[in-house]
Amino acid sequence: MTTGSRGHTRSLRRRIVHHGLVSLPPAVDPAVSARMSNTRGRDTSPEMAVRRALHRMGLRYRVNYRPVPGVRRTADIVFTKQRIAILIDGCFWHGCPDHYRPATGGRSQFWAEKIEGNQRRDHESSEAFSSAGWLVLRFWEHEDPVTVADHISSAVHEAARRTTCPASGSPRT
Ligand SMILES: [Zn+2]
């Protein structure tokens, strides 16, 4: 998250300099900039970085889409033709083993139950998608966006190969 917002500020400054304006935006306190990046919502998120990388690779996809009709669960990035549903899980909310540390103190029980509930829900969504014939790919938000996008891209191309060369087709010799 912090890396993303710093990167954003840097590129913003570069753009302003590029256009020849003298006045740079004042340096922002890190706490304020973190709050600002939160209010900007998903646009600075790791998910957005993955989406940008996929877009650069020429891949087109749906965002926050329900892959399975009748199942009220969305996936973050969806390739409908190839039937691939991608979820990028936040380290805190989904209980990343590397970054999630259980809260201590008065509200610890509340948070533990909340994260557990999210994980249960994640599992149910994956089950629902894959039992409907979808390939489900899950990533953590801490994973490198380009590596994630590479992984997704090979899955998409692999699926495209399968659908363009159906096993039921007449053998070509
Ligand atoms: Zn993590």
Image: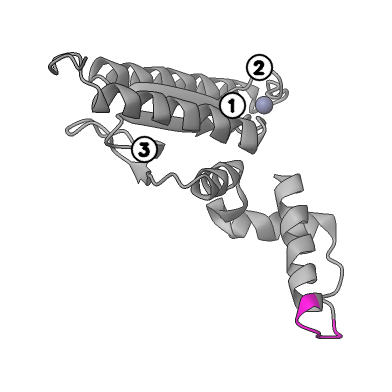
> Assess mark 1: CB under 8 A from ligand 1?
no
Q: Which mark is residue 111?
A: 1
Q: Is residue 139 magenta?
A: no
Seen as rendered, the residue at the extreme front is: 173
Answer with the quarter of the image where residue 7 lies.
bottom right
The local crowd at label 3, few if under 14, some if 14 to 19, many if 20 or more residues have their Cα within 10 Å, is many
Task: Say whether residue 47 is visible.
Answer: yes
Please state which of residues 129 and 172 is positioned toward the viewer in this rendering.
Answer: 172
Q: CA distance from mark 2 to mark 3?
A: 25 Å
- Residue displayed at 72% across by 54% down: 5
Q: Quadrant of the N terminus?
A: top right
Of the numbered discs 1 and 2, the one sitting upstream in the chain is: 2
- Across and down, in percent, residue 56 comes to 54, 49
Please state which of residues 93 and 159 is positioned toward the viewer in this rendering.
Answer: 159
**For the residue marked with disc 3, what is the amino acid?**
Val
Answer with the quarter of the image where residue 120 lies.
top left
Q: CA distance from mark 3 to mark 1?
A: 30 Å
- Residue displayed at 81% across by 85% down: 21
Report the number of numbered marks.
3
Q: Which mark is residue 7?
A: none
In terms of secondary structure, what is the magenta stretch mainly? Answer: loop
- Across and down, in percent, residue 106 comes to 68, 26
Of the numbered discs 3 and 1, the one sitting upstream in the chain is: 3
What are the residue bounds of the magenta stretch? 18-23
**For the residue marked with disc 2, what is the amino acid?**
Pro
Instruction: Name the mark nearer the viewer: 2 or 3.
Output: 3
- Residue displayed at 33% across by 25% down: 161
* Residue bearing mark 3: 78
Vertically, is 46 above or below 44? above
> Assess mark 2: CB under 8 A from ligand 1?
yes
Confirm or deny contact between disc 3 and disc 1 (CB under 8 A): no
